[in-house]
């Protein structure tokens, strides 16, 4: 642990003040801060990013520790002490007697005085919803604390260009240690957080940054060569590129999204990937005419629905302060509408995968169960059976449910739905088919 640097401390404090306004995502705040302060060295930039994200991850505990004076400065000081810093290290930064006393009090703070939600670093409403769904206090605590840890850096190997073993060897030659992900057959997990976007492997499309959980969603869709497939909420296209790879760049893969900006971010990634079967299309809504024209024609459809994102708190800790029970109510309406609309594209015998990066049952099982109740022509396929067909030994039950403490990846949910094949019509009285 390097010694405390006064300049780095004050720079981190400036960035933290901006992040705690919650006017923009924390990563966007940091990007802007670094652009406005280009003379910061790499070591200081790393400290600033770690400090801002560290405070956000522990903010519920830090709020209690700081009490009525939960200013950004006090929170940053408390975070540093909790991280194992020695009181002597603060001498260049702290001169006031009250602040020295505060630092001593942080070390003496009793975590037993915290509520379950605070210890889990989750909003009270989130912890309450998880408990109401049947999750034990111990499970809520384990989930919350695992989401409050930094995430590893996962890569997906583009097997259209290179084998995983070859990428692993090239990374090792660059001094980077990468281990195979436990479940995804094309995933690698890097030690540390190197800037992989500066490496030739990235620029030539041999690797993409993608959490292992996200990679498993593509294996649930399991598209085949020559099929017609849609990524219904494609965004910047990480899962689209995975589906295109699994299709060996054959067939037709639609990348639908309502955002022109998000689809624009897909273009350079698509160019690097070498895929030729992807058709990005902006749509006005889930009821766009271009969607309706494909009704009943697609083999597989992925709905990576807009959601609270609470399963990605390791990477986006500010989301727990920017979402609310009311905002999730609004998302539930969108999720149900999008799933119902996307289902119209699926042909008889075709597959529909509904997924979120949320940990909340009402964004997950609740949406799927309501859909199945109103769409008797669809049935649930057990996720573990589908994964076994892809030679992935992972069983979380009928649904895919991933979490950092159990599988080491972001919190994901997915359900595999199949449109029931058409059955032959019953014969009429004259013996012909009806």
Image (cartoon, rainbow, N blue to C red):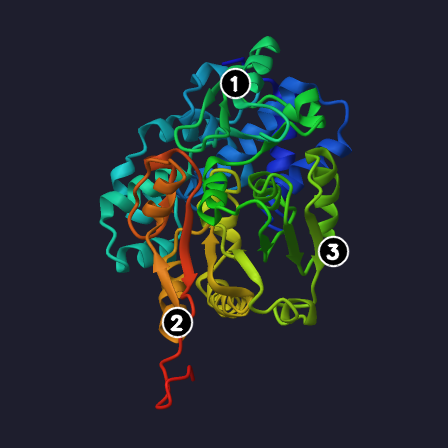
Q: What's the CA distance linking mark 2 and mark 1?
A: 46 Å
Labels 1, 3: front one: 1
Q: Which residue is pictured at 28% across the width and 35% down the height?
A: 110
Which residue is denoted by mark 2 in the rendering? 423
SS under mark 1: helix
Distance (Cα) linking label 2 and label 3 = 41 Å
Task: Name the residue tied to disc 3.
Answer: 260
Q: Position of residue 332 (x, y in %)?
A: 47, 66
- In the shown orientation, is residue 431 left or right of residue 110? right
Residue 181 x, y percent position in the rendering: 44, 27
Spatial CA distance of label 1 from label 3 is 36 Å
Q: Residue at x 62, y 41 (%)?
A: 241
Question: Crowding near pointer 1: few (<14 within 10 Å), some, many (20+)?
Answer: some
Which numbered disc covers residue 253?
A: none
Residue 165's tag is: 1
Which quarter of the image is occupied by the C terminus? bottom left
The residue located at (41%, 50%) in the rendering is 413
Element on which disc 2 rests: loop
Instruction: Answer whether labels 2 and 1 touch (C-beta < 8 Å).
Output: no
Closest to the observer, 83 or 122:
122
Q: Position of residue 239 (x, y in %)?
A: 57, 44
């Amino acid at each position: 642990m390097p010694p405390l640097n006064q300049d780095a401390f004050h720079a981190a404090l400036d960035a933290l003040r901006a992040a705690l306004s919650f006017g923009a995502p924390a990563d966007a705040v940091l990007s802007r801060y670094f652009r406005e302060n280009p003379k910061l060295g790499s070591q200081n930039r790393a400290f600033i990013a770690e400090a801002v994200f560290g405070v956000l991850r522990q903010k519920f505990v830090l709020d209690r520790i700081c009490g009525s004076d939960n200013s950004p400065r006090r929170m940053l000081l408390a975070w540093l002490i909790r991280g194992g810093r020695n009181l002597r290290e603060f001498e260049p930064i702290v001169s006031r007697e009250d602040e020295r006393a505060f630092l001593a009090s942080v070390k003496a703070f009793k975590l037993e005085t915290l509520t379950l939600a605070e210890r889990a670093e989750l909003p009270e409403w989130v912890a309450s919803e998880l408990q109401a769904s049947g999750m034990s206090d111990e499970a809520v605590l384990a989930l919350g604390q695992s989401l409050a840890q930094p995430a590893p850096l996962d890569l997906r190997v583009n097997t259209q260009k290179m084998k995983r073993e070859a990428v692993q060897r090239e990374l090792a030659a660059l001094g980077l240690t990468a281990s195979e992900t436990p479940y995804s057959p094309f995933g690698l997990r890097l030690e540390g957080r190197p800037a992989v976007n500066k490496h030739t492997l990235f620029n030539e499309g041999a690797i993409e940054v993608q959490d292992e959980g996200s990679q498993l969603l593509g294996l649930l869709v399991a598209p085949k060569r020559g099929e017609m497939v849609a990524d219904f909420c494609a965004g910047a296209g990480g899962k689209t590129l995975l589906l295109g790879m699994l299709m060996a760049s054959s067939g037709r893969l639609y990348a639908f999204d309502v955002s022109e900006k998000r689809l624009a971010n897909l273009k350079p990634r698509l160019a690097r990937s070498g895929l030729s079967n992807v058709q990005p299309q902006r749509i006005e809504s889930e009821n766009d005419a271009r969607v309706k024209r494909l009704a009943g024609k697609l083999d597989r459809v992925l709905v990576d629905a807009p959601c609270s994102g609470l399963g990605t708190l390791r990477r986006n800790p500010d989301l727990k302060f920017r979402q609310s029970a009311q905002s999730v109510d609004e998302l539930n309406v969108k999720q149900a509408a999008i799933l119902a609309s996307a289902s119209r594209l699926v042909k008889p015998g075709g597959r529909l995968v509904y997924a979120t990066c949320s940990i909340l049952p009402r964004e997950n099982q609740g949406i799927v169960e309501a859909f199945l109740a109103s769409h008797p022509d669809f049935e649930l396929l057990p996720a573990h059976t589908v994964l076994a067909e892809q030679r992935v030994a992972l069983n979380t039950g009928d649904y895919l449910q991933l979490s950092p403490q159990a599988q080491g990846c972001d919190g994901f949910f997915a359900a595999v739905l199949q449109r029931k094949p058409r059955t032959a019509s019953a014969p009429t009285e004259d013996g012909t088919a009806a």
